[in-house]
Image (cartoon, helix red, strand yellow):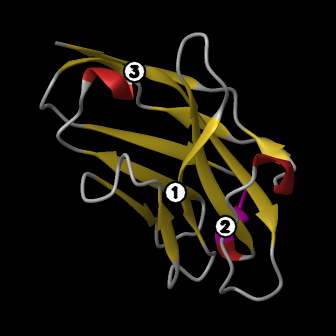
Amino acid sequence: VQLQASGGGLVQAGGSLRLSCAGWKRAFSHHAVGWFRQPPGKEREIVAARSWSGRNTYFADSVKGRFTISGSGTKETVYLQMNSLKPEDTAVYYCAARFDSTGSRFYTDRSEYNFWGQGTLVTVSS
């Protein structure tokens, strides 16, 4: 069971990037997803989370209004659209997943996830 995060890169402040988290076949039909990030020298923190139904989402205050989270129709990929990027968004971004029986829950604590991608680096220049 693997997750593959991609889409990171170097972007100027104010720019946009879309990160992708690819899972196994129909991975996200019963798995809630979270995006975390780890800035240089800091702890890993929650950025956004999504119930597998897509009905419920969570965004950290620092990204609210700038980031959105969505899923593909095939239930195999989850996206993190990042707009109006700031230098403080610079970090390694990780996607994570966990089984959820309800379809309505999202999870914001990293300890609640048991599947992780390898991380993708986002660098925002000023």
SS type, badge 3:
loop
The verdict on residue 26 being magenta is yes
The residue tagged 2 is: 28
Q: Is residue 26 visible?
A: no
Labelled pair 1, 3 in contact (Cβ < 8 Å): no
**Helix, strand or loop at mark 2:** helix
Q: Say whether marks 2 and 3 touch (CB < 8 Å).
A: no
Q: Which residue is mark 3?
A: 90
Q: Residue 103 location in percent, x, y?
A: 69, 85
Q: Is residue 45 above or below residue 77?
A: above
> Which residue, as the protein is rendered here, is positioned at the far left?
14
Mark 1 secondary-structure assignment? strand
Q: Distance from label 2 to label 3 (Cα)?
A: 27 Å
**Magenta stretch holds residue 39:** no
Q: Amino acid at mark 3?
A: Thr
Identify the residue at image location x=61%, y=10%: 41
From the image, tell me which residue sits under label 1: 78
Q: Amino acid at mark 1?
A: Val
The mark closer to the camera, 2 or 3, is 3
**Which of the 4 image quadrants contains residue 105?**
bottom right
Q: Which residues are magenta?
A: 24-28
Relative to residue 113, is residue 74 depicted above or below? below
Locate the C terminus and report the quarter of the image it occupies.
top left
Q: Residue 56: x and y, percent?
A: 52, 80
The secondary structure making up most of the magenta span is: loop
Q: Are marks 2 and 1 in contact (CB under 8 Å)?
A: yes
Residue beneath the point at 61% across and 19% down: 42
Give the mark nearer the N terminus: 2 vs 3. 2
